[in-house]
Amino acid sequence: MLGLQSCLSTLALRKRPISSFFSKIMACTLTLDVSPPVHRWMNTALQRDVFKRTIPVLAARVPASKTGFMLKSGVMKKYLMDLPKVRSVLRDPHDDLERLVLLNVSEHAALSQEVCDFLQEQSATLVVHNLELTYDYWTADEILHSILPEELCKGSPSGFAVTGHIAHMNLNKEYLPYKHIIGQIILDKNSMIKTVVNKLDSIDTKYRFFKMELLAGEPNYVVEHHESNCRFTFDFTHVYWNSRLHTEHDRLVQLFQPTDVIADVFAGVGPFAIPAAKKGCAVFANDLNPESARYLSQNIVDNKVASLVRASCEDGRDFIKKVIGRARDHPFPAYTGPKLSKMQEKEKRRLQLGGSSPTALVDQSAVENQSPRQTVSHFVMNLPDSAINFLDAFRGVLLESASERDLSGNYANMPMVHCHCFTRELQLDRAEADIIQRVESKLGHKLDTEVALHMVRSVAPNKDMYCISFRLPRDVAFGR
């Protein structure tokens, strides 16, 4: 035990200029070094028990009744223990009526004269308390920095995308020798994660989902993922899903009106289709991958939008050519207003039982179209690697669908097309020129008005993802 008087005496005996005195204080560590011990020899198996560290700190022993005053004092503010996951006040193991207020210094010389005076006024006694830190204390990034070679620490791979219970990593080759240690650390430090995988370079060329390897955790790849107030179930090893696109999913759905009919050409498991249906839109959702189509159908039922989403499993080009006719021959019912909440449903039943009209519960201004919905308003083409190559399917699409009747009146307003794509042009003006040129080449026609380009995300140092939205030219849709 170290008495307060010894602290004061130590400071009083140092008869130096004030500037020298404060220099000494600044030299003392006010921020404790709590970094984990370095174990750069570790590269195959994680050994958690070697991550231990004992750090002596000063603590002010005070009566329990004074702890609140100590913690609120402006004098003590910058000296109080502020480490994450470390309690600043502990019960004195020798006296239940006393408390230990931990300080963030380990040396007496780090305490200012003002602090020493304050502690004396509060009848405080300085003691040494040993902080015992173990593997559980440090973050994933801190542990990785203590294991990886110094030249790899700058870009240590502690980041990952979360899909359900899976952490999905994309490790650069220099980190592959440490991949299982990295995976285990990520698993340990994230309680919601049960499985850690790493994306491999190989990709399924037909269905465009990534191959992956298990780094740590359970080999369970069927996930339940929540996004946009929707629940999605799918096998992450057999379908395409990118959690980093949730903002793009939301952005596009916000462009749709509840009365719209959407044709989702590459729907996957439904990240555009199902939120759009929840909004009130009618959706034709298609994907070539049978596994994606299977989980899409399940997600439609699970999210209670079966009356608004029709799933199919066919080539995107065939889907584009057929969906206009499907909407014409088998239209969706008219939009009848926003779905009622449970409270509104209860009130509606009460009014019906009482003989009153429940129409006041429906926002009639939102019910704009009382006729069946038989014209497609938007095409969504979220297959950035090759979606542009499918645009030639729009040539004559309304002419072919109008073999028995004239559709020109139905399509006074042509559908909007939202086509995702990649470009290696990193400057906006050059990216725009590149994308428009490729789109016009496939359409065989210049783009008219209503053309917009949205930068979605950067996917690699020299590769960006965009979404180009344009009104389908009438001459293309009715061309021969």
Image (cartoon, helix red, strand yellow):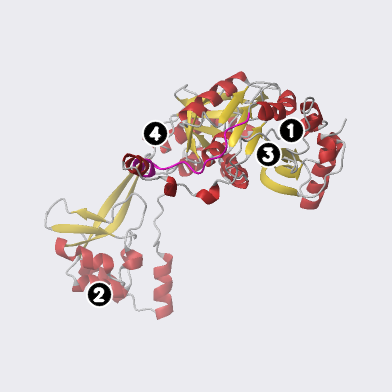
Left or right position of 104 against 470 = left
Identify the secondary structure beneath mark 1. helix
Name the mark nearer the viewer: 4 or 3: 3
User: Residue farthest to the top?
Assistant: 290
Residue 244 image label: none
Q: Residue at x 47, y 21 (%)?
A: 219
User: How far is disc 1 from disc 4 in space, using C-alphas?
Assistant: 47 Å
Residue 342 belongs to magenta span:
yes
> What stretch of residues is rendered in magenta?
331-346
Choose the circle earlier in sequence order: 3 or 2.
2
Residue 171 image-quadrant placement: top right
User: Which of the 4 image quadrants contains residue 393?
Assistant: top right
Residue farthest front in this picture: 355
> Which numbered disc covers residue 117?
2
Label 4, label 3: how far apart the Cα atoms are: 54 Å
Eye-nearest disc, 1 or 4 = 1
User: Which residue is under mark 3?
Assistant: 378
- Give the mark, 2 or 4, whose residue is nearer the N terminus: 4
Binning the other alpha carbons within 10 Å of mark 4 as few (below 14), some (14 to 19) or many (20 upward) gives few
Instruction: Describe the element under mark 3 as helix, strand or loop.
Output: strand
Q: For the residues labelled 1 and 3, say whether their Cβ atoms are less than 8 Å apart.
A: no
Q: Position of residue 365 (x, y in %)?
A: 54, 51
Percent coordinates x, y for residue 97 in the rendering: 11, 57
Classed neighbour count for the residue bearing mark 1: other residues with Cα under 10 Å, few (<14), some (14–19), many (≥20):
many
Q: CA distance from mark 1 to mark 3?
A: 15 Å
Residue type, numbered disc 2: Asp
Mark 4, residue position: 48
Disc 1 residue type (three-letter): Ala
- Mark number displayed over residue 387: 1
The disc, 4 or 3, on the residue closer to the chain's N-terminal end is: 4
Identify the mark nearer the N-term, 1 or 3.
3
- The answer to whether residue 251 of the structure is visible from this angle is yes
